[in-house]
Image (cartoon, coloured by chain):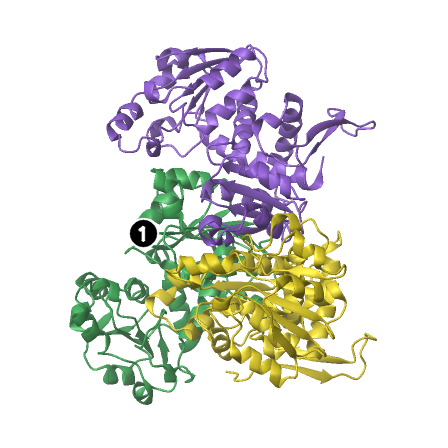
Chain colours: A green, B yellow, C purple
Amino acid sequence: MRNEIRCRAVEIENSLSPFVSKKFELDDVIEAQQFDREILNYIFEVALDMEKIEKSSSKSQMLKGYLMATLFYEPSTRTRLSFESAMKRLGGEVLTTENAREFSSAAKGETLEDTIRTVEGYSDIIVMRHFESGAAKKAAATASIPIINAGDGPGQHPTQALLDVYTIQREIGTLDGIKVGLVGDLANGRTVRSLAYLLAKYKDVKIYFVSPDVVKMKDDIKDYLTSQDVKWEECDNLMEVASECDVVYQTRIQRERFGERVDLYEQARGKYIVDKNVLKVMQRHAVVMHPLPRLDEITVDVDEDPRAAYFRQAKNGLYIRMALVKLLLLGW
Amino acid sequence: MRNEIRCRAVEIENSLSPFVSKKFELDDVIEAQQFDREILNYIFEVALDMEKIEKSSSKSQMLKGYLMATLFYEPSTRTRLSFESAMKRLGGEVLTTENAREFSSAAKGETLEDTIRTVEGYSDIIVMRHFESGAAKKAAATASIPIINAGDGPGQHPTQALLDVYTIQREIGTLDGIKVGLVGDLANGRTVRSLAYLLAKYKDVKIYFVSPDVVKMKDDIKDYLTSQDVKWEECDNLMEVASECDVVYQTRIQRERFGERVDLYEQARGKYIVDKNVLKVMQRHAVVMHPLPRLDEITVDVDEDPRAAYFRQAKNGLYIRMALVKLLLLGW
Amino acid sequence: MRNEIRCRAVEIENSLSPFVSKKFELDDVIEAQQFDREILNYIFEVALDMEKIEKSSSKSQMLKGYLMATLFYEPSTRTRLSFESAMKRLGGEVLTTENAREFSSAAKGETLEDTIRTVEGYSDIIVMRHFESGAAKKAAATASIPIINAGDGPGQHPTQALLDVYTIQREIGTLDGIKVGLVGDLANGRTVRSLAYLLAKYKDVKIYFVSPDVVKMKDDIKDYLTSQDVKWEECDNLMEVASECDVVYQTRIQRERFGERVDLYEQARGKYIVDKNVLKVMQRHAVVMHPLPRLDEITVDVDEDPRAAYFRQAKNGLYIRMALVKLLLLGW
């Protein structure tokens, strides 16, 4: 039983890499906040290696003989496939459950802790998606093998946050000093909330919130940013923000959050669309990001523009997950 | 973005195989019509190799490090397992989704194109089953990796058509000059329609249609056969047809097509049964085929007769799929 | 077509192992009764090897190139993952179907025999879970590859029975002369029934039945034990039994068996709880077992006691399944 999330830097004397003078220990991946700037840099360096491995013709067998269990209490095909691909691209193997909630012993009343104790007997690492906030932390406290949180309800989805920051790093070249416009559903989007947390770890970042009134960014994040000396601004002019920003991070208005109020949904959803006109005012080096799936909040004619970074961003999810799985199983 | 299905023969100068003086390039497997007689022969030759590989005790690792994604928008356990087995028999790996429709981002309104762009980032080849005709073609136009159509609604199921023709070749030794009786539900059966298309590529084929009135072969196929100079005939005497044919291809009357009209279904379903009596009039070299699953349109006492080819036919599906996956990933 | 379950000892002349003077042939694993004491010993020896293999850092590739199909007509995530882990820990590969009942051709009316004939064409061994008693035997009679019964309705779940006996052997060191308290739902629990059958194969075993009135052990088992000269006793004092026994085997009261009678369920469920007080009277060498999942019939504070053997028991399921898969595919 472990009560803290361990993710700490450790001095090592004779590093073989000139770039890395420290190594860190990573036990679990539970929440975006567990990572500091230095550790993010380490992870991004490994992710870059993973990109090379994935693109090379000789396939890696680095994780041969290792078994990942993807324990999904609610389905999320995209995330699951991304993790399973990450594991298999490194030669590892996977046990899959996509309906752990409905089908497993959970339905008979078994506690999450008991399920984890059983599943950890069958595998070397567990990737867990759960419908309850805090479930991943609970699992990590029980398990003696690494746990990766692949989303726990309204809580965290840390690998998404990591891949977002990694994408900005890869696309813009730096995180310090960047201007980011967060657009769309800022009230319900787990993604933009986690991203705001992580951006606060970098210097001179400026964040613009562009969202319909009904789904504005909540005060906790605003207060947090203020406390961290991160400049932020609410703005209702997408064109203006787009012309200023290095990153326009668009999100989907989540219909499921509006219940019966289809009118409010329809109103919110059409308000800020990233289209060719937005591209026109964007700077040459700037990019459009989106956590996907997208509906029509980015028009398809944007896809062909080199600044449309969202499919590269999805692919970066693979590299980040390869890096995390590698680090959790083999260490630095 | 590619707008045509590529599947063409290319002259090569110094072929190592005495049997193959050309090679062909295959980008995707979308519809039965994309294959001509020559390419079918090439594929069948590779399928025969695959049979040897599968039966040998030393396991092939030909596709080691390659990843197939089986993206099934509607479940089809049999077809999915057949493709996954094909991949794994050659040392490759698989990412599985059986409920892409219900569970994936599709439910949130994502376009097929966006899903394909994401999934192609995780895998090397996509096997797709969809509920809409034309979906596979759309996917292939988007993807930069090979797409195999594992059935798209009322549209195509090309690997079934290929395995059917391959089975006739293996069982009868030739396709030219054969007589084939297509029996059962000829109106709704995707299988028999595709088979008719492919048979038209061979010489002196004669086709008999034997079906209850409510599920007769439609005019488009009849017209096509006529236009290709293929002889065909409708006939309501199964015994007569069975005694003439090299292949009796029985199909299941699909209850789901009859809706409320259970009476019509029951009437249609009992009309043409392949049983021991039919076997008695069949020639010694002739075979009974069926795409499976079967209900009672072939009685179980037929199974033990060496002319019952339907389980061998199902197994041929494995060899054909091994061949296609190999050709799409490694080339000739 | 095979009509008998083969599992027999065969003399071999020059055994390399000093402990094994015979080998046995195992075709299928269908029911607990097919194993005699001698064969159980052989299997347990292999399971012990498997434990060493699983714990060693060099991963086994013993079953490389072999394919298991897990054909589950009803979901049982725990059992499925255990088998799939067993296969993959030995380097083998898996084809998975968790909803064979709902999704497969079975829904269209295909017989189990036809499904088996198709699936055996895609794999080397089939692990089957079915909702009907006798289904596994039927499958084994059809298949030419090994079948493992992973539970067939109210029928058998032989690998659970084997892992239970193996756990007693590992924890207590012997089966002869032991005292076992079977507690909880003895009427409906497949597990305790199979365990009673297997215990009867050992000498001087004494069994205590401790259960609420509504779920008492049925007469068939009692009569069987009597016929085999196994001493048994019904007892309503858990503390007394716990102080006597080597093994306290607790089970879950299955709510689903009570239908509308929630009152009876609630009454039965609270009656015999294994808690710290029970631990206090238990002997030092004794253990608490449970087939899992557990609700509150064992309190969580028992978990930390070294005599709480249920998670080790679950892990033993992996070793037993590794052993069986190895024996069925590679032989002794």
Residue located 62% across and 36% down the image? C324
Percent coordinates x, y for residue C327 in the rendering: 67, 37
- Figure check: B196 above or below B224: above
Residue B90 image point, x, y percent: 66, 60
Q: How many marks?
A: 1
Q: Which residue is drawn at 61% across and 85% down?
A: B227
Res B278 visible = yes
Residue drawn where x is 35% and y is 78% of the image: A288
- The percent position of residue A191, horizontal first and vertical second, equals 31, 64
In the rendered image, the vertical position of residue C3 relative to residue B183, given as above or below: above
Quick one: B332 or B35, which is closer to the camera? B35
The C terminus of chain B sits in image quarter: bottom right
Percent position of residue C150, x then y: 53, 38
Q: Mark 1 points at which residue?
A: A131
Q: Which chain carries label 1?
A: A
* Circle 1 SS class: loop
In the displayed structure image, the side of residue B43 where residue A296 appears, left or right: left
Between A235 and A201, the residue placed more toward the observer is: A235
Picture quadrant of residue B105: bottom left
Mark 1 Cα-neighbour bin, 10 Å: few <14, some 14–19, many ≥20: some
Q: In which quarter of the image is residue A106?
A: top left
